[in-house]
Image (tube, rainbow, N blue to C red):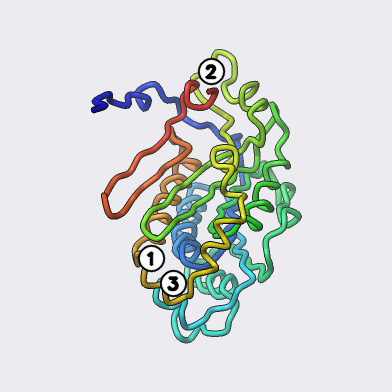
């Protein structure tokens, strides 16, 4: 029996993002997890705006609301046949007085605008997708960063199976850049984290999609926990608050609902520079 205790949190350092005046959340995927994330992002935006900084968001999804979505996604019968991204953006921007736009198309890296508005921008791409094709495009967003300079684009990816899930945060596309720039000399913080697909390359493998597509919608609905998407969204929200207000010391989190287990990988040199 392995009785060792993980003490890496005690050795961890906080993740530090570049100074920013304006932050934009780009929510890619507005379905099971994404619709719950949309509400969490809206409340975080409100909290940011009252500090004097500026927060905006763009919700991106090419899909429309169907009746089967209402059970586990934050839509109602009156939303049927309307674009998911547009429904959420319209509802939250009006009810909370926020700057939220919608793009009813598949995500493309060209949708990211680092020069939007005045001041220093920070872009947080929140991926709530369930296929490798979408993640391939999401991974391209980190190519906009300049290694060793400023990492103004972050990608947080939330994924799940029927009753388990993972959340991954990164801003660096290569292990070489990670080793060179993640920990500035004589610093007590970290500025570089591995891209989600560096931690789990299998996220880009299409085989998982074929397995999922072989199941009918009824089979998927019967096997998937009704709380799985809320849990992924809650974990993503915790990461987003750490990015915005500081103190984040983890870059990957895994959980399993049946066993009630959860673990995170903390930001230490030994965990990042293996």
Q: Answer left or right for 184 relative to 1.
A: right
Quadrant of residue 145 within the rendered picture: top right
Circle nearer the viewer, 2 or 1:
1
Q: Nearer the viewer, residue 65 or 2?
A: 2
Q: Which residue is mark 1?
A: 224
Q: How many marks?
A: 3
At mark 1, the secondary structure is loop
Category of crowding for the residue at label 2, using alpha-carbon neighbours closer than 10 angstroms: few (below 14), some (14–19), many (at least 20): few
Q: Position of residue 153 (x, y in %)?
A: 64, 43
- Asked if labels 3 and 1 touch by Cβ distance under 8 angstroms, the answer is no
Circle nearer the viewer, 3 or 2:
3
- Tell me if residue 32 comes above or below residue 191 in the rendering: below
User: At x 58% / y 70%, what residue is drawn?
Assistant: 85
Mark 2 or mark 1: whose residue is earlier in sequence: 2
* Residue 85 at least partly seen: yes
Q: Which mark is residue 187?
A: 2
Circle nearer the viewer, 1 or 3:
1
User: At x 65% / y 21%, what residue is drawn?
Assistant: 180
Q: Nearer the viewer, residue 160 or 138?
A: 160
At mark 2, the secondary structure is loop
Category of crowding for the residue at label 1, using alpha-carbon neighbours closer than 10 angstroms: few (below 14), some (14–19), many (at least 20): some
- Tell me if residue 94 comes above or below residue 25 in the rendering: below
**Quadrant of image for the N terminus:** top left
Q: Which residue is mark 3?
A: 74
At mark 3, the secondary structure is loop
Q: Position of residue 172 (x, y in %)?
A: 63, 35
């Amino acid at each position: 029996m392995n009785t060792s205790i993980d003490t890496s949190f005690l050795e961890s350092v906080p993740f530090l993002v570049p100074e920013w005046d304006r932050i934009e959340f780009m929510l890619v995927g507005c379905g099971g997890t994404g619709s719950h994330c949309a509400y969490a992002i809206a409340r975080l935006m409100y909290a940011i705006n009252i500090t004097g900084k500026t927060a905006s968001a763009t919700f991106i999804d090419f899909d429309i609301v169907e009746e089967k979505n209402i059970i586990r996604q934050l839509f109602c019968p009156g939303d049927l046949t309307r674009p998911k991204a547009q429904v959420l953006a319209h509802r939250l921007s009006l009810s909370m007085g926020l700057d939220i736009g919608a793009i009813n198309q598949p995500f493309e890296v060209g949708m990211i605008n680092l020069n939007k508005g005045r001041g220093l921008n920070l872009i947080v791409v929140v991926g709530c997708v369930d296929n490798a094709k979408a993640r391939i495009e999401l991974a391209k967003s980190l190519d906009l960063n300049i290694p060793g300079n400023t990492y103004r684009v972050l990608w947080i990816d939330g994924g799940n199976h029927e009753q388990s899930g993972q959340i991954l945060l990164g801003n660096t596309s290569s292990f070489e850049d990670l080793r060179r720039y993640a920990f500035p000399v004589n610093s007590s913080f970290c500025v570089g984290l591995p891209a989600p697909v560096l931690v789990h390359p299998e996220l880009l493998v299409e085989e998982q999609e074929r397995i999922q597509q072989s199941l009918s919608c009824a089979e998927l609905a019967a096997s998937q926990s009704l709380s799985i998407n809320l849990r992924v969204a809650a974990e993503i929200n915790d990461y987003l608050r750490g990015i915005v207000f500081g103190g984040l010391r983890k870059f990957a989190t895994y959980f399993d609902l049946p066993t009630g287990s959860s673990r995170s990988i903390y930001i230490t040199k030994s965990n990042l520079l293996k």
